[in-house]
Image: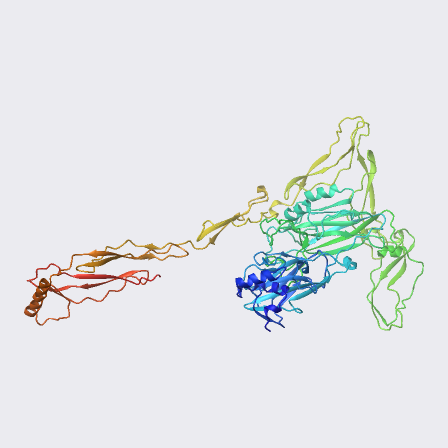
Amino acid sequence: MRLSSASWSPALLALALPLAVALAFSDETLDKVAKSEGYCSRILRAQGTRREGYTEFSLRVEGDPDSYKPGSSYRVTLSAAPPSYFRGFTLIALKENREGDKEEDHAGTFQIIDEEETQFMSNCPVAVTESTPRRRTRIQVFWVAPPAGTGCVILKASIVQKRIIYFQDEGSLTKKLCEQDSTLDGVTDRPILDCCACGTAKYRLTFYGNWSEKTHPKDYPRRANHWSAIIGGSHSKNYVLWEYGGYASEGVKQVAELGSPVKMEEEIRQQSDEVLTVIKAKAQWPAWQPLNVRAAPSAEFSVDRTRHLMSFLTMMGPSPDWNVGLSAEDLCTKECGWVQKVVQDLIPWDAGTDSGVTYESPNKPTIPQEKIRPLTSLDHPQSPFYDPEGGSITQVARVVIERIARKGEQCNIVPDNVDDIVADLAPEEKDEDDTPETCIYSNWSPWSACSSSTCEKGKRMRQRMLKAQLDLSVPCPDTQDFEPCMGPGCSDEEGSTCTMSEWLIWSPCSVTCGTGVRSRERYVKQFPEDGSVCTLPTQETEKCTVNEDCSPSSCLVTEWGEWDECSATCGMGTRKRHRMIKMNPADGSMCKAETSQTEKCMMPECHTIPCLLSPWTEWSDCSVTCGKGMRRRHRTLKSLAELGDCNEELEQVEKCMLPECPIDCEVSEWSQWSECNKSCGKGHMIRTRMILMEPQFGGAPCPETVQRKKCRVRKCLRNPSIQKLRWREARESRRSEQPREESDGEQFPGCKMRPWTSWSECTKQCGGGIQERYMTVKKRFKSSQFTSCKDKKEIRACNVHPC
């Protein structure tokens, strides 16, 4: 289908601008268009062919959404299915039913991802086009959705392949997105509800790294892979540690880029009113190990009604600024209880502070800082997670959060585990199984623990799942079954058959001065098979002393905090713990209580820790400005020298090639001047020189290789009698002395000459050479009175055209 330029709307003209590499335009056309059109009026009217009904090119918005959320960013990909390709393209976003000839017709803004591939059009800055015309199969940009109230938006693309424009109003190069209904905001942004649970709950966070060379083989860093120390906290909804679409704080940045939790912990502790527990766990070297070799990192924390959210993060190392973690995970249920277990697979996210694209990319700060976002498989072809098909990233870790204890009065309306259900049982009992044959169930679960904690009659429960109901007219009985049981004091088996957890941390001391008590708890991990309750204690207490001196001259201090991490990453080190002065002595004296303690700590043997190296620096400039040279890059050893020798190379050198250096033309010295080409009167002489080196790579051109100058040997004789006399003598001499000799030689007064030889080969193929020929004396006459009878040579220039 052939389209005339007059039939194109301004928006379609915008889409056709990349044809500059394939189509010709005139300055006159540009002047006319600039004067006649409004917004984007400088776009030229391209003459080309438009094709319909194709399928090899497509415009895709990541996630294939049907709607957009105002202000959100979306990755837009323009691609060609092999073996197709395109040389030029244009992307533009228009409000629905708009022509694009006014600024307000355009919706949202594009953001450039790769400046080598894409750029904003100079004549129409709201559109995106190619940076350089060349073959390509895919480009990507970000599109930031317009503000609320814009309505539907049409994303349109053009493709240029030679002289062909591909465009389609309703096809694979057009995408329509309508504004998301505000009532659906919760689909993507989960609202945080107020918590109605009572008491407190204690949880254990366990982190399982799944980032290994087997699961993520591309560019896997074998020697330095690790997870940094986990840092986080349980907090209220008024405090945000990190979130998608937000900006990383300085603490998050230091975790993301350096793996250091120090600044992040400082930020969390500054929000003491909004934070209940600081969550900390040790780093994991290497990033993955079988659980039978090393236990997974874990930490315990508590939540309450106001601080019922938990967030944490850990750096994936080495990486530019990649992390995993949870943000504002709500552990309070809508039934006013506490979540029993959370299992979440994690994919990495980008903190928006470094622009590296590989695990060991050199530092490249992102300026200005970008928002936190999850990594995708289409971020960059060099990314270790890159997938040209745009598939999902394989999870790199899993976090398990388990509730291990509850304290205080619980007010949940609906019981949230088996123990609570048994405790609320009615006294009815069922002795027979009246399951109809038309009801298909799974197998029964094991019996729960007995609801009675003493030697009294109680209930225990088991459950099953209804798989199928073959006859809908016949009701299926309940999926729960109960039976009577006796408390643990009536069981013949000992409580030691129980499996118990480790003891949790001690509670605060009951007094702030003097001697008090503190307690700690543990929980049952496995009940006995007979349904009895374990008799092993789940709580114990001990005496504790705070501020031994309670006199007016003493000061009040807090309890000791947790021990810091060991100062050494391997071998012997030290660690500290601190406490704070809550109140100085009443008598105004100085507080003498110590506020810090130090003890030794032992880490794994040093030989088990690999060399820890910084990322490679950028390559240096080439050592030359043209031609072949060398360039270098460096990295430094970050682990301590006393950990042992590190044999990894710290410097790399490679060859580099820049454009060839210019080579000027080289010529030889001038030859001697030739003899004059006339024996009398005016003539000329020449001299030549040879080209030794042709100019290359823009070098200076060759100078002239042949020069001429005038010459005058002597005046030619003008007396006719003397001239006739000479010719007569020569003629007589030829007749008398050699009547039989050839007569094809040239005659000169007083001698007979042989014919001229043929011209010699030219001394050069191009650039100016010389040729020579000779005439030799065949016979001199004795009667000759002239001295001009001698051998002669002629020289001429040849092949004077440039090489």
Residue 81 visible: no
Expressed as whole percent of the image width and height from the top left, the position of residue 438 reads 86, 72
Expressed as whole percent of the image width and height from the top left, the position of residue 364 reads 59, 49
Q: Quadrant of the C terminus?
A: bottom left
Specify the color scheme. Answer: rainbow
Please tell me whether residue 761 is drawn above or below residue 304 in the rendered image: below
Residue 528 visible: yes
Q: Image check: 234 left or right of 741? A: right
Q: Image check: 638 left or right of 337? A: left
Q: Residue furthest right?
A: 427
Q: Which residue occupies the foreground of this view, 782 or 491?
A: 782
Please tell me whether residue 7 is drawn above or below residue 611 in the rendered image: below
Q: Which residue occupies the foreground of this view, 446 or 796?
A: 796
Please tell me in which quadrant of the rendered image residue 581 appears.
Answer: top right
Expressed as whole percent of the image width and height from the top left, the position of residue 684 reads 23, 58
Please tell me in which quadrant of the rendered image residue 83 appears.
Answer: bottom right
Q: Image check: 131 left or right of 772? A: right
Q: Quadrant of the N terminus?
A: bottom right
